[in-house]
Image (cartoon, helix red, strand yellow):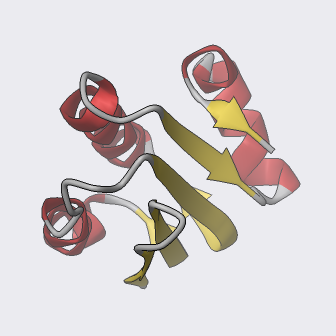
Amino acid sequence: MSVETKTDAVAGKFFITVSGRFDFGLHQQFRDATNSIGPNIKEIEVDLSRTDYLDSSALGMLLVLRDKVGQQRSSVSIKNAKPEVKKILEIANFNKLFTMA
């Protein structure tokens, strides 16, 4: 389980990649990652291509991220979710709250 971040300051993008199980065990790492988002960031991309599982606490963390940056940033997107993870996101109607690709 890990959370990795990358910033493309020129393009104004911030990337978060979650690996393994996305659950309460990653709460502090995810919080630290979101706290490091700079003021010039316009787009945030959460890459779930290496995420095998997510639970309700992960959904909550994504909502907190959306609420935290929603007022000042243009977009938060969820990318590359595996079919089983994407199904959970769709059941929770995250496809209506986030851009999903």
Image spot of residue 20 (x, y percent): 55, 79
- Camera-nearest residue between 62 and 54: 62
Residue drawn 14% across the image and 71% down it = 32
Compared to residue 30, the image places residue 1 above or below, namely: below
Image quadrant containing the C terminus:
top right
* Farthest residue, direction front: 10
- Camera-nearest residue between 4 and 91: 4
- Camera-nearest residue between 73 and 59: 73
Image spot of residue 52 (x, y percent): 66, 70
Residue drawn 77% across the image and 36% down it = 87
Compared to residue 76, the image places residue 5 above or below, namely: below
- Camera-nearest residue between 17 and 36: 36
Residue drawn 32% across the image and 26% down it = 70
Compared to residue 32, the image places residue 63 above or below, namely: above
Image spot of residue 64 (x, y percent): 24, 35
Image quadrant containing the N terminus:
bottom left
The picture quadrant where one finds residue 24 is: bottom left
Q: How many marks?
A: 0
Q: Is residue 81 left or right of residue 73?
A: right
Image spot of residue 2 (x, y percent): 39, 85
Residue drawn 75% across the image and 43% down it = 86
